Image (cartoon, coloured by chain):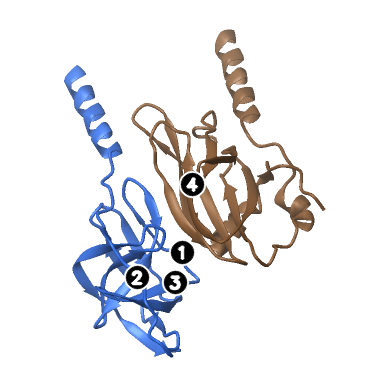
């Protein structure tokens, strides 16, 4: 009985530790710089769903690491217009391809599904209204925002 | 018991192997000289079944802006909606329309056409520029 209780507490602590801990969107919103005229912005985010919380793959954009997929976290990057490919380092390779034009904001949601053995995290493109509404409750996990 | 578990495991593994989106290379959409960008809207939501088993809904309140023509029809990019086609991978997509029917999807990154079989009549409620 005591062992079960200790084990449960340990699991809860582990799950909490797996979640993003940065400032909430509302706290960093004012510090997010305006988009340069010749660039577009890509937001990456993942809900705070605890399923698969231990699976935190690297986020690759056109072969370059741009961040980690952390439950409850979001970050953004600015890039030149062009074609982009997002790939997460999970057990199954599933790419997302999309275009980015100047002044555009694209939102990439990273969703968790149950695979054959372990949970998987997949990228999907969502519209701006959906992305913005879902990011509001998340924590910023990107690099320090330069003012 | 063991056999049932094995079958369930096998089914789960098969389900994990999504079909690749079947597509053919396409030239980029060409805009006719002097033509204004046409805009269409749909009178109702349209549910589309993809050959990969996934479904997509073309939303009634989206604007579809013409970005040119390819061999299979006129290509419309959505505004107010993100459209993707999904199989083993997920690709941003525009719709391709000919004679009021959805003939398939244009993938702007891959420069490719994904046919829709059978084609689907679209309830186009507004056309303008």
Helix, strand or loop at disc 4?
Answer: strand
Q: Which residue is mark 3?
A: B78
Residue B36 is situated, as x and y percent measured from the top left of the image, at 45, 88
Contact check, label 2 and label 3, Cβ < 8 Å: yes
Contact check, label 4 and label 2, Cβ < 8 Å: no
Q: Is residue B1 shown to the viewer in this render?
A: no
Which shade of the palette goes to chain A?
Answer: brown
Helix, strand or loop at disc 1?
Answer: loop
Chain identifier, blue in the render:
B
Contact check, label 4 and label 3, Cβ < 8 Å: no
Q: Earlier in the sequence, mark 2 or mark 3?
A: 3
How far is the residue under mark 1 from the one under mark 4? 16 Å
Q: Which residue is mark 2?
A: B95
User: Looking at the picture, does residue B125 appear above or below residue B74?
Assistant: below
Residue B38 is situated, as x and y percent measured from the top left of the image, at 42, 85
Q: Which residue is mark 4?
A: A86
Q: Earlier in the sequence, mark 1 or mark 2?
A: 1
Q: Which residue is mark 1?
A: B82
Contact check, label 1 and label 4, Cβ < 8 Å: no
User: Looking at the picture, does residue A29 appear above or below residue B68?
Assistant: above
How far is the residue under mark 1 from the one under mark 3? 7 Å
Residue A136 is situated, as x and y percent measured from the top left of the image, at 66, 54
Report in which chain the residue with disc 1 lies: B
- Residue B87 or residue B10, whichever sits in front: B87
Crowding near the residue tagged with mark 4, few <14, some 14–19, many ≥20 C-alpha atoms within 10 Å? many
Report in which chain the residue with disc 3 lies: B
Q: Nearer the viewer, mark 1 or mark 2?
A: 2
Helix, strand or loop at disc 2?
Answer: strand
């Amino acid at each position: 009985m005591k062992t079960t209780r200790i084990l449960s507490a340990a699991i809860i602590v582990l799950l909490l530790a797996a979640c993003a801990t940065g400032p909430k969107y509302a706290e960093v919103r004012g510090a997010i710089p305006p988009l340069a005229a010749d660039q577009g912005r890509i937001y990456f985010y993942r809900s705070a769903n605890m399923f698969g919380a231990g699976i935190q793959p690297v986020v690759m954009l056109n072969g370059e690491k741009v961040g980690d997929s952390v439950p409850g976290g979001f970050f953004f990057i600015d890039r030149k217009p062009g074609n982009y490919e997002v790939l997460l380092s999970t057990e199954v390779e599933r790419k997302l391809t999309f275009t980015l034009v100047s002044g555009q904001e694209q939102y990439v949601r990273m969703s968790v599904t149950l695979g054959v053995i372990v949970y998987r995290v997949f990228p999907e493109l969502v519209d701006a209204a959906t992305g913005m509404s879902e990011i509001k409750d998340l924590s910023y996990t990107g690099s320090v925002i330069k003012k | 018991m063991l056999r049932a578990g094995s079958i369930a495991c096998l089914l789960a593994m098969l389900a994990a192997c999504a079909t690749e989106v079947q597509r053919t290379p396409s030239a980029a959409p060409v805009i006719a000289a002097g033509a204004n960008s046409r805009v269409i809207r749909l009178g109702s939501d349209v549910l589309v079944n993809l050959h990969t088993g996934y479904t997509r809904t073309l939303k009634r309140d989206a604007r579809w802006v013409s970005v040119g023509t390819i061999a299979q029809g006129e290509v419309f990019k959505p505004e107010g909606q993100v459209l993707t086609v999904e199989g083993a991978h997920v690709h941003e997509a525009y719709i391709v329309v000919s004679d009021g029917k959805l003939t398939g999807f244009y993938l702007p990154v891959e420069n490719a056409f994904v046919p829709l079989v059978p084609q689907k009549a679209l309830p186009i409620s507004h056309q303008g520029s």
